[in-house]
Image (cartoon, helix red, strand yellow):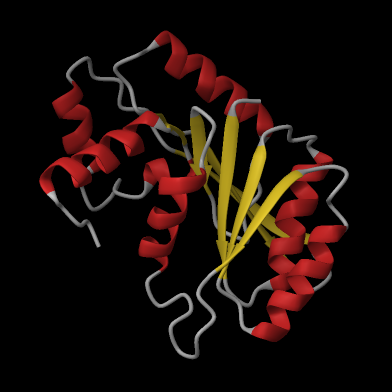
Amino acid sequence: MDHTIIIPTKNRTSWLFFALMCLEKFNYKGKVVILDGSDETDHKINNQNFEKFKSSLNLKTHQENDSKGSRNKRINLSKYNFFKNNIETNYFTVMNDDDCFFPNFAKYGIEFLERNSDFSAITGIEINNIVDNQFKITSSFNKVYPEFLSEDPLDRILYYATKQNQTLPFFGVCRTNMMNELFQFEKEYNFKPF
């Protein structure tokens, strides 16, 4: 699958393990990148857990700068710099370490973006499961993000710039080339976003 899931994490080993277990169970065939800002103890646990998924997931890990006090202070910069040099697929999704991602949505998102070249991202349904300490679901609710399919790209940008909708593409399927254009802009104009 021409898709990368980027998962930033910090000291949440159980949640990250659960997220990876979901990707394995749902037979995700894209790439998975873990940006690990955990302290040394949790980083070691994460590495032990990653070994369990070696044969089932295309997993790449990146430990953030481990100098005392600097790790994960600027997670957006860390994601940005890692993304700049390491994402090789045409589509990506960023998800939290306590989320599950359904691979069928990646397929749907990629197909939608291939049919609609003027869209940069597509969002979907958020399913919130409340779990106990044994990861058994105790309750759940769904949130459907309405797609804003205006033909005018500026209207779409303005829609996603509102406070209510500003994070929607975070869990959507996005085109990698939109980030490449940002990197080119940064280079041409000596612009630093962070």
Q: Is residue 92 left or right of residue 187?
A: right
- Residue drawn at x 37%, y 28% is 147
User: In the image, is 76 to the left or to the right of 40?
Assistant: left
Camera sees residue 186: yes
In the picture provided, is 115 more to the left or to the right than 29? left
- In front here: 99 or 33? 33
Q: Is residue 136 visible?
A: no
The percent coordinates of residue 114 (x first, y second) are: 45, 13
In the image shown, does 162 or 120 lie closer to the viewer? 120
- Tell me which residue sits at (11%, 45%) in the image: 189
Horizontal and vertical percent position of residue 174: 43, 33
Q: Quadrant of the C terminus?
A: bottom left
At x 38%, y 54%, the residue is 80
Quarter of the figure that contains the N terminus: top right
Q: Position of residue 84 (x, y in %)?
A: 40, 47
Q: Position of residue 91 (x, y in %)?
A: 50, 30
Q: Residue furthest bottom?
A: 68
Q: Quadrant of residue 108?
A: top right
Q: Is residue 87 above or below residue 1?
A: below
